[in-house]
Image: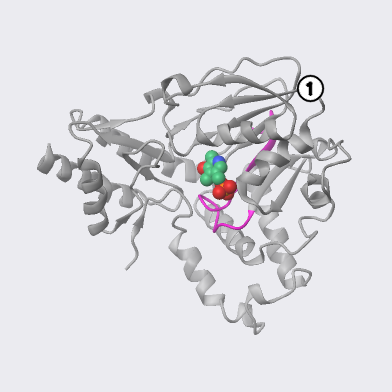
Amino acid sequence: MRMINFSAGPTGLPLSVLEHAQSELVDYRGEGYSVMEISHRSKTYEEVHFGAMDKIKKLYGIGDEYEVLFLQGGAHLQFAMIPMNLSQGGVCEYANTGVWTNKAIKEAKLMGVNVRVAASSEDDKFSYIPEIKFGDDADYTYICSNNTIYGTQYKALPKSKAPLVVDASSDFFSQPLDFSDIGILYGGAQKNAGPSGVTIVIIRKDLIERVSSQNVPTFLRYKTHADAKSLYNTPPTFAIYLLNLTMQWIMDNGGLEGIKARNDAKAKLLYDAIDGSSGFYKGHAQKEHRSVMNVSYNITPDATLEPLFVEEALKHNMLGLKGHRHLGGIRASIYNAVSQNDVKVLVDFMKEFARKNG
Ligand SMILES: *Cc1c(COP(=O)(O)O)cnc(C)c1O
Protein backbone atom coordinates (compact mmCIF):
# COMPACT_ATOMS: atom_id res chain seq x y z
CA MET A 1 0.00 0.00 0.00
CA ARG A 2 1.32 3.44 -0.98
CA MET A 3 0.31 6.57 0.91
CA ILE A 4 -0.99 9.60 -0.97
CA ASN A 5 1.89 11.95 -0.38
CA PHE A 6 1.23 15.67 0.15
CA SER A 7 4.60 16.30 1.83
CA ALA A 8 6.49 19.51 1.02
CA GLY A 9 9.81 17.80 0.33
CA PRO A 10 11.32 15.31 0.10
CA THR A 11 8.09 13.86 -1.17
CA GLY A 12 6.57 11.24 -3.46
CA LEU A 13 8.12 10.24 -6.74
CA PRO A 14 6.14 8.74 -9.62
CA LEU A 15 5.53 5.07 -8.85
CA SER A 16 6.73 4.04 -12.31
CA VAL A 17 10.06 5.77 -11.65
CA LEU A 18 10.51 3.88 -8.38
CA GLU A 19 9.55 0.59 -9.99
CA HIS A 20 11.94 1.18 -12.85
CA ALA A 21 14.74 1.89 -10.36
CA GLN A 22 13.77 -1.19 -8.38
CA SER A 23 13.96 -3.39 -11.46
CA GLU A 24 17.53 -2.21 -12.14
CA LEU A 25 18.71 -1.85 -8.57
CA VAL A 26 20.97 -4.86 -8.16
CA ASP A 27 21.74 -5.48 -11.81
CA TYR A 28 21.83 -2.42 -14.01
CA ARG A 29 20.89 -3.47 -17.55
CA GLY A 30 22.62 -6.82 -17.28
CA GLU A 31 25.96 -5.26 -16.35
CA GLY A 32 26.05 -7.08 -13.03
CA TYR A 33 26.18 -4.16 -10.61
CA SER A 34 24.02 -1.31 -9.43
CA VAL A 35 24.34 2.08 -11.07
CA MET A 36 25.39 3.40 -7.65
CA GLU A 37 28.27 0.94 -7.48
CA ILE A 38 30.32 2.13 -10.41
CA SER A 39 32.79 4.93 -11.13
CA HIS A 40 31.41 8.31 -12.02
CA ARG A 41 34.04 8.26 -14.78
CA SER A 42 32.59 5.10 -16.38
CA LYS A 43 30.76 5.15 -19.70
CA THR A 44 27.72 3.61 -18.02
CA TYR A 45 27.41 6.45 -15.54
CA GLU A 46 28.27 9.16 -18.06
CA GLU A 47 25.26 8.16 -20.13
CA VAL A 48 23.03 8.73 -17.11
CA HIS A 49 24.71 12.03 -16.21
CA PHE A 50 24.66 13.60 -19.66
CA GLY A 51 21.28 12.04 -20.40
CA ALA A 52 19.79 13.92 -17.46
CA MET A 53 21.41 17.20 -18.56
CA ASP A 54 20.11 16.78 -22.12
CA LYS A 55 16.59 16.06 -20.96
CA ILE A 56 16.54 19.14 -18.75
CA LYS A 57 17.58 21.32 -21.68
CA LYS A 58 15.05 19.68 -23.99
CA LEU A 59 12.22 20.08 -21.49
CA TYR A 60 12.86 23.81 -21.11
CA GLY A 61 13.77 24.26 -24.77
CA ILE A 62 17.12 25.88 -24.02
CA GLY A 63 20.31 25.57 -26.03
CA ASP A 64 24.03 26.07 -25.65
CA GLU A 65 23.68 29.51 -24.10
CA TYR A 66 22.93 27.69 -20.84
CA GLU A 67 24.83 25.14 -18.81
CA VAL A 68 23.12 22.62 -16.54
CA LEU A 69 25.11 21.94 -13.37
CA PHE A 70 24.60 19.18 -10.82
CA LEU A 71 25.84 20.44 -7.46
CA GLN A 72 25.42 19.54 -3.80
CA GLY A 73 24.60 21.51 -0.69
CA GLY A 74 20.97 22.15 -1.58
CA ALA A 75 19.35 25.50 -2.24
CA HIS A 76 21.02 26.65 0.96
CA LEU A 77 24.50 26.61 -0.54
CA GLN A 78 23.21 28.56 -3.53
CA PHE A 79 22.16 31.36 -1.18
CA ALA A 80 25.90 31.97 -0.72
CA MET A 81 27.25 30.88 -4.12
CA ILE A 82 25.01 33.30 -6.01
CA PRO A 83 26.38 36.51 -4.46
CA MET A 84 29.92 35.06 -4.38
CA ASN A 85 29.86 34.36 -8.10
CA LEU A 86 27.63 37.09 -9.50
CA SER A 87 28.29 40.23 -7.48
CA GLN A 88 30.42 42.73 -9.34
CA GLY A 89 30.46 45.34 -6.63
CA GLY A 90 27.06 46.76 -7.65
CA VAL A 91 23.73 46.16 -6.00
CA CYS A 92 22.29 42.70 -5.47
CA GLU A 93 18.55 43.14 -5.74
CA TYR A 94 16.17 40.84 -3.83
CA ALA A 95 12.40 40.42 -3.69
CA ASN A 96 11.47 39.16 -0.25
CA THR A 97 8.53 36.79 -0.40
CA GLY A 98 9.08 34.65 2.66
CA VAL A 99 11.33 32.37 4.64
CA TRP A 100 13.47 31.23 1.70
CA THR A 101 14.23 34.65 0.28
CA ASN A 102 14.89 35.92 3.82
CA LYS A 103 17.54 33.27 4.17
CA ALA A 104 19.03 34.16 0.79
CA ILE A 105 19.15 37.85 1.77
CA LYS A 106 20.79 37.04 5.08
CA GLU A 107 23.42 34.93 3.38
CA ALA A 108 24.16 37.57 0.73
CA LYS A 109 24.73 40.11 3.50
CA LEU A 110 27.08 37.66 5.16
CA MET A 111 29.05 37.51 1.92
CA GLY A 112 29.56 41.25 2.21
CA VAL A 113 27.75 42.25 -0.99
CA ASN A 114 25.57 45.32 -1.33
CA VAL A 115 22.02 44.01 -0.85
CA ARG A 116 18.89 45.96 -1.70
CA VAL A 117 15.47 44.56 -0.86
CA ALA A 118 13.51 45.84 -3.85
CA ALA A 119 10.16 44.34 -2.84
CA SER A 120 8.62 42.66 0.16
CA SER A 121 5.27 41.19 1.15
CA GLU A 122 6.19 40.84 4.79
CA ASP A 123 3.54 43.44 5.72
CA ASP A 124 0.79 40.90 5.05
CA LYS A 125 2.38 37.65 6.19
CA PHE A 126 3.79 37.01 2.72
CA SER A 127 0.32 36.34 1.33
CA TYR A 128 1.03 37.99 -2.03
CA ILE A 129 3.73 38.59 -4.66
CA PRO A 130 4.93 42.21 -4.45
CA GLU A 131 5.88 44.50 -7.35
CA ILE A 132 9.63 44.84 -7.71
CA LYS A 133 11.22 48.30 -8.02
CA PHE A 134 14.06 47.49 -10.39
CA GLY A 135 17.16 49.63 -10.18
CA ASP A 136 19.60 50.36 -13.02
CA ASP A 137 22.55 49.42 -10.86
CA ALA A 138 21.77 45.78 -10.11
CA ASP A 139 24.23 42.97 -10.76
CA TYR A 140 21.31 40.55 -10.58
CA THR A 141 17.70 40.41 -9.42
CA TYR A 142 16.79 37.55 -7.11
CA ILE A 143 13.36 36.02 -6.65
CA CYS A 144 11.79 32.81 -5.40
CA SER A 145 9.29 31.74 -8.07
CA ASN A 146 7.14 29.65 -5.73
CA ASN A 147 6.94 30.18 -2.00
CA THR A 148 6.63 26.71 -0.59
CA ILE A 149 5.53 27.76 2.88
CA TYR A 150 3.09 30.62 2.17
CA GLY A 151 1.72 29.11 -1.02
CA THR A 152 2.29 32.07 -3.35
CA GLN A 153 3.72 31.94 -6.86
CA TYR A 154 4.70 34.34 -9.65
CA LYS A 155 2.18 33.84 -12.46
CA ALA A 156 4.85 35.04 -14.89
CA LEU A 157 8.48 35.77 -14.21
CA PRO A 158 9.11 39.50 -13.79
CA LYS A 159 10.82 41.44 -16.59
CA SER A 160 14.01 42.38 -14.81
CA LYS A 161 16.73 44.73 -16.02
CA ALA A 162 19.56 42.64 -14.60
CA PRO A 163 19.85 38.85 -15.04
CA LEU A 164 17.11 37.16 -13.08
CA VAL A 165 18.14 34.59 -10.48
CA VAL A 166 15.30 32.26 -9.56
CA ASP A 167 14.98 29.86 -6.66
CA ALA A 168 12.63 27.38 -8.32
CA SER A 169 13.07 24.65 -5.71
CA SER A 170 9.36 24.03 -5.37
CA ASP A 171 8.07 24.65 -8.90
CA PHE A 172 10.94 23.28 -10.97
CA PHE A 173 9.68 21.30 -14.01
CA SER A 174 6.04 22.11 -13.20
CA GLN A 175 5.38 24.27 -16.29
CA PRO A 176 7.13 25.70 -19.36
CA LEU A 177 9.14 28.88 -18.68
CA ASP A 178 10.20 31.88 -20.73
CA PHE A 179 13.97 31.94 -20.29
CA SER A 180 14.57 35.33 -21.91
CA ASP A 181 15.50 37.09 -18.64
CA ILE A 182 16.73 34.10 -16.67
CA GLY A 183 20.35 34.16 -15.60
CA ILE A 184 20.10 31.31 -13.12
CA LEU A 185 17.25 28.92 -12.36
CA TYR A 186 18.04 26.57 -9.52
CA GLY A 187 16.66 24.24 -6.89
CA GLY A 188 17.12 20.99 -5.05
CA ALA A 189 15.67 17.95 -6.80
CA GLN A 190 13.64 16.73 -3.86
CA LYS A 191 10.32 18.40 -4.65
CA ASN A 192 9.55 17.78 -8.30
CA ALA A 193 12.61 16.23 -9.85
CA GLY A 194 13.94 13.35 -7.80
CA PRO A 195 15.34 12.54 -4.37
CA SER A 196 17.39 14.90 -2.21
CA GLY A 197 21.14 15.11 -2.74
CA VAL A 198 21.44 16.87 -6.08
CA THR A 199 20.96 20.60 -6.68
CA ILE A 200 20.21 21.57 -10.27
CA VAL A 201 21.60 24.92 -11.40
CA ILE A 202 20.74 26.12 -14.90
CA ILE A 203 23.06 29.04 -15.60
CA ARG A 204 23.53 31.36 -18.57
CA LYS A 205 27.07 30.89 -19.82
CA ASP A 206 28.27 34.48 -19.51
CA LEU A 207 27.46 34.42 -15.79
CA ILE A 208 29.77 31.46 -15.26
CA GLU A 209 32.70 33.72 -16.17
CA ARG A 210 31.67 36.53 -13.82
CA VAL A 211 33.33 35.25 -10.68
CA SER A 212 35.95 37.82 -9.81
CA SER A 213 37.07 37.60 -6.22
CA GLN A 214 40.32 35.79 -5.56
CA ASN A 215 38.76 34.59 -2.36
CA VAL A 216 36.05 32.35 -3.79
CA PRO A 217 37.05 28.74 -3.04
CA THR A 218 37.54 26.50 -6.05
CA PHE A 219 34.61 24.28 -5.16
CA LEU A 220 32.24 27.23 -4.79
CA ARG A 221 32.88 28.62 -8.27
CA TYR A 222 30.29 27.79 -10.94
CA LYS A 223 33.18 27.80 -13.41
CA THR A 224 34.85 24.85 -11.69
CA HIS A 225 31.77 22.71 -12.13
CA ALA A 226 30.92 23.97 -15.60
CA ASP A 227 34.45 23.28 -16.89
CA ALA A 228 34.30 19.77 -15.43
CA LYS A 229 30.74 19.12 -16.65
CA SER A 230 29.71 18.58 -13.02
CA LEU A 231 32.25 15.78 -12.66
CA TYR A 232 34.85 17.84 -10.79
CA ASN A 233 34.41 15.56 -7.81
CA THR A 234 32.14 12.58 -7.22
CA PRO A 235 28.57 13.70 -7.90
CA PRO A 236 25.56 12.13 -6.11
CA THR A 237 25.30 9.47 -8.81
CA PHE A 238 22.22 7.64 -7.60
CA ALA A 239 20.27 10.85 -7.09
CA ILE A 240 21.17 11.91 -10.63
CA TYR A 241 20.10 8.50 -11.92
CA LEU A 242 16.66 9.00 -10.33
CA LEU A 243 16.56 12.56 -11.65
CA ASN A 244 17.18 11.19 -15.14
CA LEU A 245 14.31 8.72 -14.79
CA THR A 246 12.01 11.46 -13.48
CA MET A 247 12.86 13.73 -16.43
CA GLN A 248 12.02 10.83 -18.76
CA TRP A 249 8.70 10.43 -16.92
CA ILE A 250 7.89 14.10 -17.58
CA MET A 251 8.71 13.63 -21.27
CA ASP A 252 6.44 10.58 -21.39
CA ASN A 253 3.63 12.64 -19.84
CA GLY A 254 3.47 15.38 -22.44
CA GLY A 255 6.53 17.35 -21.40
CA LEU A 256 6.16 20.53 -19.38
CA GLU A 257 2.99 21.50 -21.29
CA GLY A 258 1.35 18.25 -20.31
CA ILE A 259 2.57 18.53 -16.74
CA LYS A 260 1.26 22.10 -16.50
CA ALA A 261 -2.21 21.05 -17.67
CA ARG A 262 -2.27 18.32 -15.02
CA ASN A 263 -1.04 20.69 -12.32
CA ASP A 264 -3.53 23.44 -13.20
CA ALA A 265 -6.42 20.98 -13.05
CA LYS A 266 -5.27 19.64 -9.66
CA ALA A 267 -4.88 23.12 -8.16
CA LYS A 268 -8.30 24.18 -9.45
CA LEU A 269 -9.94 21.17 -7.85
CA LEU A 270 -8.40 21.95 -4.47
CA TYR A 271 -8.90 25.74 -4.50
CA ASP A 272 -12.50 25.27 -5.62
CA ALA A 273 -13.04 23.02 -2.61
CA ILE A 274 -11.57 25.67 -0.28
CA ASP A 275 -13.57 28.51 -1.86
CA GLY A 276 -16.73 26.44 -1.94
CA SER A 277 -16.58 25.45 1.75
CA SER A 278 -18.73 28.39 2.97
CA GLY A 279 -15.75 29.71 4.92
CA PHE A 280 -14.89 26.49 6.74
CA TYR A 281 -11.53 26.45 4.93
CA LYS A 282 -9.65 29.64 4.14
CA GLY A 283 -6.61 29.87 1.86
CA HIS A 284 -3.62 31.88 3.09
CA ALA A 285 -2.48 33.36 -0.24
CA GLN A 286 -4.39 36.11 -2.00
CA LYS A 287 -6.30 34.54 -4.87
CA GLU A 288 -4.38 36.03 -7.78
CA HIS A 289 -1.06 34.95 -6.26
CA ARG A 290 -1.95 31.39 -5.37
CA SER A 291 0.56 28.64 -5.90
CA VAL A 292 -0.22 25.69 -8.13
CA MET A 293 2.19 23.56 -6.09
CA ASN A 294 1.68 24.32 -2.39
CA VAL A 295 -1.78 25.04 -1.05
CA SER A 296 -1.70 26.51 2.48
CA TYR A 297 -5.00 26.94 4.29
CA ASN A 298 -6.67 27.12 7.67
CA ILE A 299 -9.82 25.85 9.31
CA THR A 300 -11.48 29.10 10.30
CA PRO A 301 -14.26 28.19 12.73
CA ASP A 302 -11.78 26.57 15.07
CA ALA A 303 -8.03 26.22 14.58
CA THR A 304 -7.91 23.38 17.09
CA LEU A 305 -9.58 21.26 14.41
CA GLU A 306 -6.41 21.48 12.32
CA PRO A 307 -4.40 18.80 14.18
CA LEU A 308 -7.49 16.58 14.08
CA PHE A 309 -7.75 17.10 10.33
CA VAL A 310 -4.13 16.07 9.86
CA GLU A 311 -4.54 13.04 12.10
CA GLU A 312 -7.73 11.81 10.43
CA ALA A 313 -6.29 12.39 6.97
CA LEU A 314 -3.39 10.15 7.95
CA LYS A 315 -5.85 7.40 8.84
CA HIS A 316 -7.17 7.79 5.29
CA ASN A 317 -3.63 7.23 3.93
CA MET A 318 -2.89 10.90 3.28
CA LEU A 319 0.57 11.96 4.37
CA GLY A 320 2.24 15.31 5.04
CA LEU A 321 -0.68 17.72 5.43
CA LYS A 322 0.56 19.57 8.50
CA GLY A 323 1.37 23.22 7.74
CA HIS A 324 4.91 24.57 8.09
CA ARG A 325 5.79 25.69 11.60
CA HIS A 326 6.04 29.31 10.41
CA LEU A 327 2.42 29.43 9.33
CA GLY A 328 0.59 26.55 11.00
CA GLY A 329 -2.67 25.25 9.56
CA ILE A 330 -2.74 22.80 6.70
CA ARG A 331 -0.57 22.58 3.62
CA ALA A 332 -1.15 20.26 0.72
CA SER A 333 1.83 20.08 -1.61
CA ILE A 334 0.53 18.86 -4.94
CA TYR A 335 3.75 18.39 -6.88
CA ASN A 336 4.07 16.63 -10.23
CA ALA A 337 3.84 13.11 -8.83
CA VAL A 338 0.48 13.77 -7.12
CA SER A 339 -2.33 12.69 -9.44
CA GLN A 340 -5.67 14.35 -10.03
CA ASN A 341 -7.29 11.37 -8.37
CA ASP A 342 -5.11 11.86 -5.28
CA VAL A 343 -6.39 15.43 -5.01
CA LYS A 344 -9.94 14.17 -5.50
CA VAL A 345 -9.49 11.89 -2.49
CA LEU A 346 -8.33 14.87 -0.41
CA VAL A 347 -11.20 17.06 -1.58
CA ASP A 348 -13.77 14.38 -0.72
CA PHE A 349 -12.18 13.99 2.70
CA MET A 350 -12.28 17.78 3.23
CA LYS A 351 -15.98 17.91 2.42
CA GLU A 352 -16.75 15.09 4.81
CA PHE A 353 -14.59 16.64 7.55
CA ALA A 354 -16.34 20.00 7.17
CA ARG A 355 -19.74 18.32 7.28
CA LYS A 356 -18.89 16.49 10.51
CA ASN A 357 -17.16 19.39 12.25
CA GLY A 358 -18.75 22.50 10.73
C1 LIG B 1 12.86 23.46 0.05
C2 LIG B 1 13.26 24.81 -0.37
C3 LIG B 1 14.54 25.32 -0.11
C4 LIG B 1 15.57 24.56 0.70
O1 LIG B 1 16.15 23.57 -0.05
P1 LIG B 1 17.39 22.69 0.51
O2 LIG B 1 17.68 21.79 -0.65
O3 LIG B 1 16.92 21.98 1.73
O4 LIG B 1 18.51 23.63 0.80
C5 LIG B 1 14.85 26.57 -0.62
N1 LIG B 1 13.96 27.28 -1.32
C6 LIG B 1 12.72 26.83 -1.57
C7 LIG B 1 11.78 27.67 -2.36
C8 LIG B 1 12.34 25.59 -1.10
O5 LIG B 1 11.09 25.14 -1.36
> Does the stretch in magenta take in 179?
yes
Residue 264 in sight: yes
Q: How many marks?
A: 1
The local crowd at label 1, few if under 14, some if 14 to 19, many if 20 or more residues have their Cα within 10 Å, is some
Q: Is residue 170 shown left or right of residue 283?
A: right
- The residue beneath circle 1 is 90
Q: Residue at x 55, y 57 (%)?
A: 194
Q: Residue furthest bottom?
A: 32
The residue at label 1 has a CB less than 8 Å from ligand 1:
no
Q: Indicate yes or no whether the magenta region holds residue 294.
A: no
Coordinates of residue 84 in the picture (x, y in percent): 77, 37
Q: Is residue 172 visible?
A: no
Q: Which residues are magenta?
A: 178-198
Secondary structure of the residue carrying tag 1 is: loop
Expressed as whole percent of the image width and height from the top left, the position of residue 140 reads 72, 27
Q: Is residue 343 left or right of residue 131?
A: left
Q: Horizontal and vertical percent for residue 23?
A: 52, 76
Q: In the depicted view, which residue is nearer to us: 333 or 310?
A: 310
Q: Quadrant of residue 85?
A: top right
Q: Quadrant of the C terminus?
A: top left
Q: Is residue 70 above or below residue 272?
A: below
Residue shown at 48% from the left, 45% from the top: 259
Q: Amino acid at mark 1?
A: Gly
